[in-house]
Image (cartoon, rainbow, N blue to C red):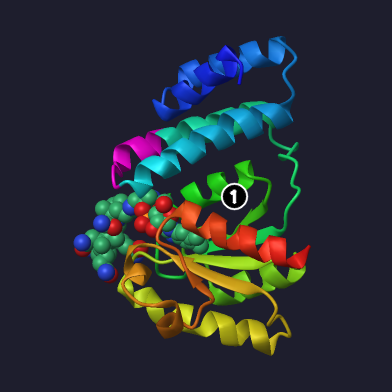
Amino acid sequence: MTARLESLVQALLDGDQALATTELGRLRQDKVSPHRIVADGIEEAMARLDAKCTVEQFNLLEIMLCGRAITAVIKALYPPGQPPPHTRGTVVLASLEGDIHDLGKNIVKVVLTATGYYVVDCGKDCPLDRLIDTAKAHAALAVGVSGLITTVVPQVLKVRDRLAREGLGAISVLAGGAALKQASAEQLRVDFLAQTAFDGLGYLDQIEAGRR
Ligand code: B12
C-alpha cells in the first residue's frame, strides 16, 4: 500500500473527517482510482476496526467517529446521484416501526456500501409493509433489520413469514442490534443474528459465495 493510502486509513481510524477528505483529495490528484481507494483505503480501515472490535477493544465513540469519517469520504468520492459501484447483491435495511434508533443500522449501511453491496435504506420507524415491498421491488439478496428496543421483537418475528407469503422465501433475513442480540436466530425466526456489522458482512459474503 502507498504511504498516501496508509495516511487515509489512519485518518479514518482516527475519525478525523477533515484530514480524511484532504487525503482523499491528494489521492484523486495522484490519479488513484476510486476502486483502489475503496479497496485499499476504506475497506482496509474497516478491516482494522473489525480486528479491534474482535479483540474486545470496542469503543462506541471511536466506531462512530470512524463511521462518520468513512461516510464523508464515500460522499466526496461518489457525490449524490452517482452511487458507489456495486459488485454484490442488494440489501434492504431498516429499523422497524416504533424504533427510532438508527446509529447501528447506519454503520451497517456504510460497511456494506463500502464493500460493494447495494444498500436500500428504509430508514427508522419503518412499517413492515414498506420493508417487504422494498425487498420485492429490488429483488433483494437479503433484508437486514436493526432492533434496539424490545417492543420491536413481535415485528421481527413476522419478517420471514411475510417474505414467504409474497413468494420471497429465498431472501435471507439478518437481524442485529442490542435488543435482538439477546435472543437467538431461531427464536427470532431469522437466518442470521449478527453481533456486529462486520459479522453481518461475513454472513452476506457467504451467501454471495454460495450463489456463484
Ligand atoms: C443512542 C441511544 C438512543 C438515541 C438514538 C439515536 C439514534 N439516532 O439512533 C436516542 C436518545 C434518540 C434514544 C431514544 C430512546 N431510547 Co435509546 N438508546 C441508545 C443507546 C444508548 C445506544 C444505542 C446505539 O446507538 N448503540 C451504538 C450502535 C453502533 O450499536 P448497535 O445498534 O448495537 O449496532 C451495532 C451492532 O449491533 C450491529 N447491528 C445493529 N443493527 C444491525 C442490523 C443488521 C442487519 C446487522 C447485520 C448488524 C446490526 O452493527 C452495529 C455496529 O457493529 C442504547 C443503550 C445500548 N447499550 O444499546 C439505548 C437503548 C437502546 N434505548 C432505550 C430506550 C428505552 C429508549 C427510549 C424509549 C427512551 C425514552 N423513554 O424515550 C427512546 C425512544 C425509542 C424509540 N421509540 O425508538 C433502551 C431500550 C430498552 C429495551 N430493551 O427495550 C436502551 C437499551 C437503553 C436502556 N438500557 O434502557 N436512544
Residue for badge 1 = 112
**Which of 25/39 is in front?**
39
**Which of 68/47 is in front?**
47
Look at the image and tell me whether residue 157 can be seen.
yes
Number of on-image labels: 1
Q: Position of residue 132 (x, y in %)?
A: 64, 74
**Left or right side of 56 for 118:** right
Indicate which quadrant contains ligand 1. Answer: bottom left
Quadrant of res 131: bottom right
The quarter of the image holding the C terminus is bottom right
Residue at x-position 59% and y-position 49%: 112
Q: Position of residue 79 (x, y in %)?
A: 69, 31
Q: Residues within 10 Å of mark 1 (few under 14, many from 20)?
A: many
Quadrant of res 66: top left
Q: Which secondary structure class fits the magenta region best?
A: helix
Q: Position of residue 91 (x, y in %)?
A: 64, 60
**Left or right side of 166 for 199:** left
128 drawn magenta? no
Question: Residue 196, relative to residue 147: is it above or below?
Answer: above
The quarter of the image holding the N terminus is top right
59 drawn magenta? yes
Look at the image and tell me whether residue 140 can be seen.
no
Identity of the amino acid at label 1? Leu
Question: Residue 94, relative to residue 152: is it above or below?
Answer: above
Q: Position of residue 89 (x, y in %)?
A: 72, 58
Q: Please report the bounds of the magenta region as a residue range.
A: 56-65
Residue at x-position 62% and y-position 46%: 113
Q: Which element carries disc 1, helix, strand or loop? A: helix
Question: Residue 102, relative to residue 51: is it above or below?
Answer: below
Residue at x-position 69% and y-position 16%: 28
